[in-house]
Amino acid sequence: MLYGKKNQLGDSYDTPIFGTTESGSSVPKDVLGKDSIAPNVAYRLIKDELMNEGNARLNLATFCQTYMEDEATKLMAETLEKNAIDKSEYPQTTEMENRCVNMIANLWNAPKELNYIGTSTVGSSEACMLGGMAMKFRWRNRAEKLGIDTTKRKPNLVVSSGFQVCWEKFCVYWDIEMRLVPMDEEHMSLNVDKVLDYVDDYTIGVVALQGITYTGKFDDIKALDALLEEYNKTAKISVPIHVDAASGG
């Protein structure tokens, strides 16, 4: 015996999108539609629109994450409603964030007697922005104490010409002069021997890239550190290093 289905609307969501009435309707792209559409239809429309984008799993190498365990995906889905910046409402999330800071500090052999700090970000570009801001404010505070006119000209940031685009954005957003150390066939990463040619009292820092997109090379952090350690012994304002650990972090 056959029975009628009471929840016909719910069952209609199982119908493939291309067999629905919505498939023959125009969907506005730049304004909200006047009528709602079934969730499976919305899903299929968006999924299909993304089909022509790159697939990181087909790349020879990628900075993107191409796979994670189902449990990780499940955790992310189950915590989407959390507003992690609200530390008082989500104290355990904050505690886990602090643990991650300690894990990274331990991984990088930070001396235990130091009061190191850190924070989570939505991605490496935001991390670079925060690191760049810290360098700028640090430079400004020291320059003012030394009587250097911080309004005379722009502060500058030194980086190789193989920089990540976020550094260009940082310099535009925060009014910083970007000084590029050229790369060539003999120097497929930062040419440490040329760095000091671009450094002066208005330099907020030198960026070292751990993974240059165009060449795959890592900047020589050890050599750069030795160079700036020696420079800072006599410099009016010491110049720090920001390590952009793109793929080498």
Image (tube, rainbow, N blue to C red):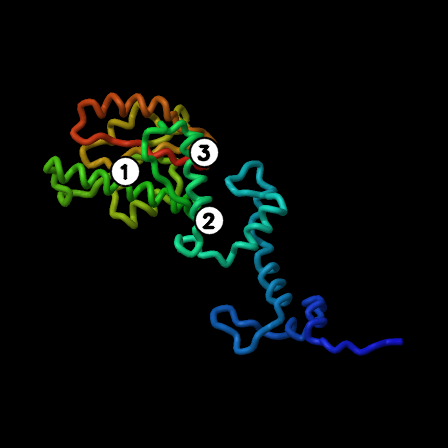
Query: Position of 223 compared to 61: left or right?
Result: left
Q: Residue 86, image x and y in percent?
A: 40, 55
- Local SS, label 2: helix
Q: Which residue is mark 3?
A: 249
Q: Residue 248, image x and y in percent?
A: 46, 32
Q: Residues within 10 Å of mark 2 (few under 14, many from 20)?
A: few
State the residue at coordinates (25%, 27%).
196
Q: Residue 49 appears in which quarter of the rendering?
A: bottom right
Q: Which residue is mark 1?
A: 157
Q: Amino acid at mark 2?
A: Gln
- Local SS, label 1: strand
Seen in the picture, residue 69 relative to 222 is either above or below; the reply is: below
Whether tag 1 and tag 2 are in contact, CB under 8 A, the answer is no
Which quadrant of the rendered structure holds the C terminus? Answer: top left
Q: Residues within 10 Å of mark 3 (few under 14, many from 20)?
A: few
Q: Amino acid at mark 1?
A: Leu
Q: Residues within 10 Å of mark 1 (few under 14, many from 20)?
A: many
Q: Nearer the viewer, mark 2 or mark 3?
A: 2
Q: Nearer the viewer, residue 203 or 121?
A: 121
Q: CA distance from mark 1 to mark 3?
A: 21 Å
Q: CA distance from mark 1 to mark 2?
A: 38 Å
Seen in the picture, residue 23 relative to 187 is either above or below; the reply is: below
Q: Which residue is mark 2?
A: 92
**Label 2 vs 3, first from the N-terminus:** 2
Q: Nearer the viewer, residue 76 or 177?
A: 76
Q: Residue 35 appears in which quarter of the rendering?
A: bottom right
Query: Position of 149 compared to 198: left or right?
Result: left
